[in-house]
Image (cartoon, helix red, strand yellow):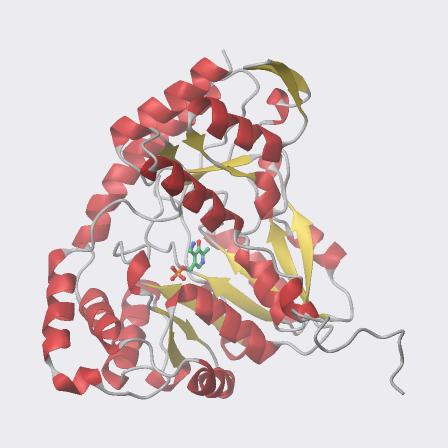
């Protein structure tokens, strides 16, 4: 007789591990906005974290050529094309001053997969990862999938959304293994200065921790902020540091899906073994495109940066004109992260009366319904009371979209 108190294998349909994971909130908002747009509604999307520019022509050409070459029609080494790994090592030295061997590079299906692979390689069940909040929505899920426990440390707008060493120390326990670090940050656009990075790196070293530093927005820094790469500013960390990067943001290549992790060779080997079973090599055509990107110069990103910088000034100014909104000036990436706490706890008009809005999640739904503007609520980033707006959209749409918010909350 089987026990009746336990459910049958078929009742337990989805594993606890995956059952606990939420859909990416940012992709969800973007999908909803795109679906409404497809229905013909004039939605303006501030949801997606992707440049609105096409991939530069020379990169596209390299991919077209790669399609025609039969050697790219076959499996290649799971960890990445040797020439791409070499070029990524050279690019890392060029852009970050960090010297690494190609054997320390794993080419992944976007930076997202690098984060997943890195945590899978670093964490045992119960290991804690300190995650500064507001955080990008994928980090805690990737940590939990690897059996780890994310521990948030919240930094609000009064500290420019940047955590201090004192806050990190207060969150450290005997189970802490890794610090997640990202600068420039998604969702806040904050950039840590070289001095702040050095202090945090020293704290990591003092407590024998690992650090995963996400540098995907490395080239999108404004106002001449004095910053740098964690392992270059803290060379003593090299053996306990994983760098995540990719071509998505720098070269407007979000759809090509090429990223990488760089770390000590033993950790990278473990992550490569995982990839050899999970996905094998990243598409060779996309890898050839990425090769052209990282071997090329930074002209394209400089042009995009000029446009982002202009839009950044406009969006911050226009958001701060709304009573109840406080938007610090971000110095990197392409996100504005205003506090909307001053708009909450109020009644707002609807077609059949009014509605009281208490949370930023409700506010973002109201904004989409009434103004047809898509924004991501702070709940997605572990910090309710805020909205994230990507300013990687056309100047006219940006002004029209924020103009609608100004009218809605006038
Ligand atoms: N890190 C950060 C901070 C990001 O914002 C993103 C994309 N939103 C990624 C990594 C991953 O980018 P991708 O997988 O497209 O390379």
Give the x, y percent position of residue 6.
85, 75
From the viewer's perspective, is residue 87 above or below residue 115? below
| Residue 250 visible in the snapshot | yes
> Which one is in front, 359 or 330?
359
Depicted 147 relative to depicted 317: above or below:
below
- Asked if residue 363 lies left or right of residue 60, the reply is right
Between 111 and 157, the one lying in front of the other is 111
User: x, y (%) of residue 347?
Assistant: 65, 15
- The one nearer the camera, 188 or 97, is 188
Q: Is 147 left or right of 291, judged from the image as shown?
A: right
The answer to whether residue 23 is left or right of residue 247 is right
404 to 222, vertically: above or below: above
**Which corner quadrant of the figure contains ligand 1?**
bottom left
Q: In the rendering, at what x and y percent does residue 325 appear?
A: 54, 23
Is the residue 170 above or below the residue 157 in the image? below
Q: Position of residue 244 (x, y in %)?
A: 44, 67
């Amino acid at each position: 007789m089987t026990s009746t108190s336990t459910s049958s294998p078929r009742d337990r349909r989805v594993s606890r591990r995956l059952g606990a994971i939420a859909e990416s909130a940012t992709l969800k908002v973007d999908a909803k906005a795109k679906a409404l747009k497809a229905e013909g509604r004039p939605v303006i999307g501030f949801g997606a974290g992707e440049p609105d520019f096409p991939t530069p022509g020379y990169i596209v050409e390299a991919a077209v050529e790669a399609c025609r070459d039969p050697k790219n029609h076959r499996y290649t080494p799971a960890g990445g094309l040797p020439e791409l790994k070499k070029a990524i090592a050279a690019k890392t030295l060029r852009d970050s001053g960090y010297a690494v061997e190609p054997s320390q590079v794993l080419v992944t299906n976007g930076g997202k997969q690098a984060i997943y692979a890195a945590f899978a390689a670093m964490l045992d069940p119960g290991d804690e990862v300190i995650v500064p909040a507001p955080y990008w929505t994928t980090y805690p899920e990737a940590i939990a999938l690897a059996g780890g426990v994310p521990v948030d440390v919240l930094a609000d707008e009064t500290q420019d959304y940047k955590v201090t060493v004192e806050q990190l120390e207060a969150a450290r326990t005997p189970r802490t293994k890794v610090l997640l670090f990202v600068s420039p940050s998604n969702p806040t656009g904050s950039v840590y200065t070289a001095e702040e990075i050095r202090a945090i790196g020293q704290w990591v070293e003092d407590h024998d921790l690992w650090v995963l530093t996400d540098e995907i927005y490395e080239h999108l820094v404004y106002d001449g902020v004095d910053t740098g790469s964690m392992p270059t500013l803290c060379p003593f960390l090299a053996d306990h540091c994983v760098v995540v990067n990719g071509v998505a943001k720098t070269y407007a290549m979000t759809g090509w899906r090429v990223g990488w992790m760089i770390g000590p060779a033993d950790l990278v080997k473990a992550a490569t073994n995982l990839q050899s079973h999970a996905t094998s090599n990243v598409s060779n055509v996309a890898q050839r495109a990425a090769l052209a990107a990282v071997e090329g110069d930074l002209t394209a990103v400089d042009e995009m940066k000029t446009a982002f910088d202009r839009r950044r000034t406009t969006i911050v100014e226009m958001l701060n004109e709304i009573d109840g909104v406080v938007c610090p000036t971000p110095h990197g990436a392409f996100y504005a992260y205003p506090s909307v706490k001053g708009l909450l706890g109020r009644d707002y008009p609807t077609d059949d009366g009014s509605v009281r809005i208490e949370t930023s999640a409700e506010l973002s739904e109201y904004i989409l319904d009434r103004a047809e503007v898509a924004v991501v609520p702070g709940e997605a980033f572990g910090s309710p009371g805020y909205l994230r707006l990507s300013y990687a959209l056309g100047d006219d749409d940006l002004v029209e979209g924020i103009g609608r918010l100004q009218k809605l909350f006038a």
